[in-house]
Amino acid sequence: MSEAIEKVKCLIIGSGPAGYTAAIYAARANMSPVLYQGMQPGGQLTTTNEVENFPGYPEGITGPDMMVELQKQAERFEADVRTGFIDKVDFSGDVHKVWVEGGKEIHCDTVIISTGASAKYLGLESEQHYLKIGGGVSACAVCDGFFYRGHETIIVGAGDSACEEAHYLSKLCKKVTMLVRKDTFRASKIMAERVIATENIEIMFNTETVEVLGDGQGVTGAKVKNNKTGEITDIAATGFFVAIGHKPNTDIFKDYIDLDDTGYIKYAQPGTSLTNVAGVFVSGDAADKRYRQAITAAGTGCMAALDAERYLAAKGH
Ligand code: NDP
């Protein structure tokens, strides 16, 4: 027998700073929000070490601790925080329908999307193997760089993230080899120059990864190819970092919500959290490829809750 359909005034999808901030505001406005935490409770910040740029924490705070605090703050106002993820939606009608892991159906007056973004990987079998077993592949130097103190590491990418992470690693590691697939950086000049000026970072241009090398348990290096000369080289390293951008977690919305050509949700009205569907709002990295900060995510979470509250008030709820 199928479960009864639950009715919810405000459903929040995702549990990063955007989702929890939306939950705090919605709960304090008596909207009885229900928040589904998603695949990665706490979001991307849980893979971050120290957060030093969130106002109000003069000594800094770890990403996981900050997320625990945000959850507590939301629950203090009786936001209903649940584990589980939403894997299907139907926003075609007046009532917005969502499904929790293919089963339980929820009908929502308003939905706040705060599903964030995920790091991209190269997709090589060898990379995925060592990523899955925690054997030396990572997309977050700040989270995992510590484990490679004094070692040699590799980082792939040429954007601002790759430069920032390469520089971060250079302070911990004996040597960092940066693999850039073109003959130029995509990063801003200042970030690229900082990397170029760092003695223990070797930059290999026109270079692509053929295979992440390892002994089955852990990374031992990478086989790389110069895409101009065809030359193949093996580089020794115990850590293989990937910094090639992020993908917004918006696939389940694509039939209903307007996305840009890279999958980010488009705001229906700039300066608001409105999407093209009335009653569905967006906050955080799912709609932000420019700032991608905890504080901007929190700010847009607040906006989404306020917009949802106004939407409900206009409908006489
Ligand atoms: P970007 O999309 O800017 O850069 C991605 C990089 O990865 C590009 O150099 C791209 O190469 C490379 N890449 C993509 N796919 C592959 C692949 N399969 N193999 C090898 N290389 C690949 O992402 P970022 O995460 O660096 O930055 C995203 C946004 O965040 C940007 O707007 C950036 O400015 C901003 N940012 C700002 C920071 C700051 O100011 N402190 C810090 C970090 C990010 P190619 O150039 O060849 O396409």
Image: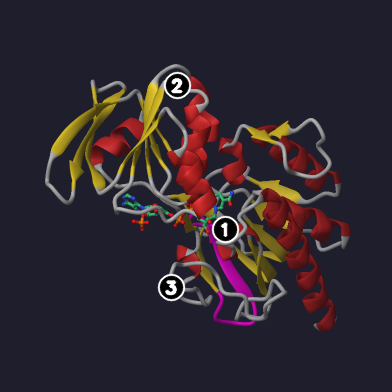
| Disc 3: which residue | 261
At label 3, the amino acid type is Asp
Q: Is residue 276 above or below residue 56?
A: below
Q: Residue furthest front?
A: 197
| Residue 41 visible | no
Over which residues does the magenta segment extend? Answer: 91-104
Q: Is residue 201 left or right of residue 96?
A: left
Circle 3 residues within 10 Å: few <14, some 14–19, many ≥20? few
- The answer to which of marks 1 and 3 sits earlier in the sequence is 1
Give yes or no for contact between labels 3 and 2 (Cβ–Cβ under 8 Å).
Answer: no
| Disc 2: which residue | 148
Q: Is residue 147 above or below residue 42?
A: above
Find residue 53 and report its horizontal and vertical position in percent.
Answer: 73, 42
Instruction: Please tell me whether mark 2 sits on a helix, a strand or a loop.
Output: helix
Main secondary structure found in the magenta portion = loop
- The answer to which of marks 3 and 2 sits earlier in the sequence is 2
| Disc 1: which residue | 3
Which corner quadrant holds the C terminus? bottom right
| Quarter holding residue 133 | top left
Q: Nearer the viewer, mark 1 or mark 3?
A: 3
Find residue 152 and report its horizontal and vertical position in percent.
Answer: 37, 23
